[in-house]
Amino acid sequence: MFIIGHRGARAAARENTLHAVEVGIACADYVEVDVRLSREGMPVVIHDATLDRTTDGSGAVCTYLLSELKALDTGDGEQIPGLQEVVSLVTGGGAACLSRSRRRGVRRRSAACWTAMILKNS
């Protein structure tokens, strides 16, 4: 049996942040995070298609450049991490397994979402 930290460890820290991932890897075998694309196609770790609920920004994630997303606050001084930052934190530079979530009837890039399952480096 494996223990998976959902959105890092969202019950203990702000979801999909580096702090949540740190807490998650301390007590789980894997961490799961949500991935969306910035305007230039860079993978960033955020659950929602919009920034409104989890950051001090507003609008669709896919309309912002990575540098603009990194300037937003997710609370407690945290930023939206890039997927590579999360993978490096968990594995020391290894790889993640991505799966695309499709929602019925949705085909826009702004709604595309992936889930990353990352095994920690033991």
Image (cartoon, grey):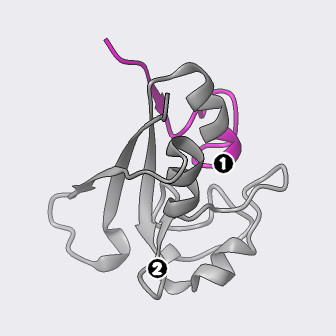
- Which residue is at the far right? 77
Looking at the rendering, the stretch of residues picked out in magenta corresponds to: 1-20
Percent from the top left, x then y, of residue 36? 42, 66
The 10 Å Cα crowd at callout 1, few under 14, some 14 to 19, many 20 or more, is: many
Given residues 37 and 111, the one toward you in this image is 37
CA distance separating discs 2 and 1? 21 Å
Q: Check disc 1 and report its element: helix, strand or loop.
A: helix
Q: Amino acid at mark 1?
A: Leu
Given residues 51 and 90, the one toward you in this image is 90
Q: Check disc 2 and report its element: helix, strand or loop.
A: helix
- Which residue is at the far left? 105
Identified at 56% across, 65% down, the residue is 82
Q: Which residue carries the number 1 mark?
A: 18
Rendered position, 89 above or below 63: above
Q: Is residue 73 magenta?
A: no
Q: Which residue carries the number 2 mark?
A: 62
Identified at 57% across, 77% down, the residue is 59
Percent from the top left, x then y, of residue 92? 55, 47
Identified at 72% across, 57% down, the residue is 74
Q: Amino acid at mark 2?
A: Cys
Rendered position, 23 above or below 83: above
Rendered position, 3 above or below 43: above
Which quadrant, please, contains the N terminus?
top left
Q: Tell me where residue 107 sits by quadrant.
A: bottom left
Closest to the camera, between mark 2 and mark 1, is 1
